[in-house]
Image (cartoon, rainbow, N blue to C red):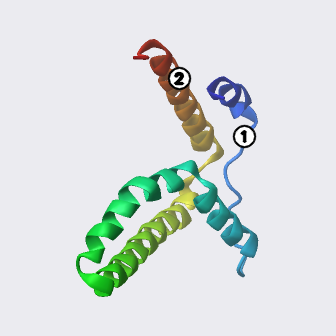
């Protein structure tokens, strides 16, 4: 994957910087499905999530309600922060910067791949 990204990086361009008003339900549904289908989501809920709910149950339904709303609030603030940073940052993202970022992360992927192969235990 990293090698393919390095080879295709010269042809890549930065994100579309035009503003398109309105709500794109495709992005919303895609984000929801990615979250639910993601293996990390299932593993998190099977381990940390269940443990957290059990601890919240020590405080009764109020504990579960506070946990739920606290979790939703944390997610909302996190994704709002990411969205805000992307919205403000895309004006500064040139094609050259984008291609260099792709190259950097491609090299990182290759390095991690080799390190996992070498350091297998």
Would you name the residue on which mark 2 appears?
A: 113
Secondary structure beneath dot 1 equals: loop
Query: Marks 1 and 2: which is nearer the front?
Result: 2
Q: Earlier in the sequence, mark 1 or mark 2?
A: 1
Write the residue at 72% across / 40% down: 12
Image quadrant where residue 118 sits = top left
Would you name the residue on which mark 1 appears?
A: 12
In this rendering, position of residue 108 left or right of residue 51: right
Write the residue at 53% across / 23% down: 113
Camera-nearest residue between 42 and 88: 42
Q: Is residue 11 above or below residue 61?
A: above
Residue lying at the far top in this picture: please name it.
Answer: 118
Where the C terminus falls, by quadrant? top left
In this rendering, position of residue 60 left or right of residue 29: left
In percent of width and height, residue 95 lies at 65, 44
Residue lying at the far left in this picture: please name it.
Answer: 59
Secondary structure beneath dot 2 equals: helix
């Amino acid at each position: 994957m990293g090698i393919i990204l390095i080879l295709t990086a010269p042809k890549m361009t930065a994100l579309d910087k035009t503003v398109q008003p309105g709500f794109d339900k495709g992005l919303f549904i895609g984000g929801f499905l990615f979250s639910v289908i993601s293996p990390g989501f299932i593993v998190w809920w099977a381990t940390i999530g269940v443990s957290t709910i059990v601890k919240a149950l020590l405080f009764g339904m109020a504990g579960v309600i506070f946990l739920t709303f606290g979790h939703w609030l944390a997610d909302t603030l996190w994704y709002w922060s990411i969205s805000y940073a992307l919205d403000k940052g895309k004006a500064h993202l040139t094609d050259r910067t984008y291609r260099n970022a792709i190259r950097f992360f491609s090299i990182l992927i290759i390095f991690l791949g080799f390190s996992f192969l070498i350091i297998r235990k």
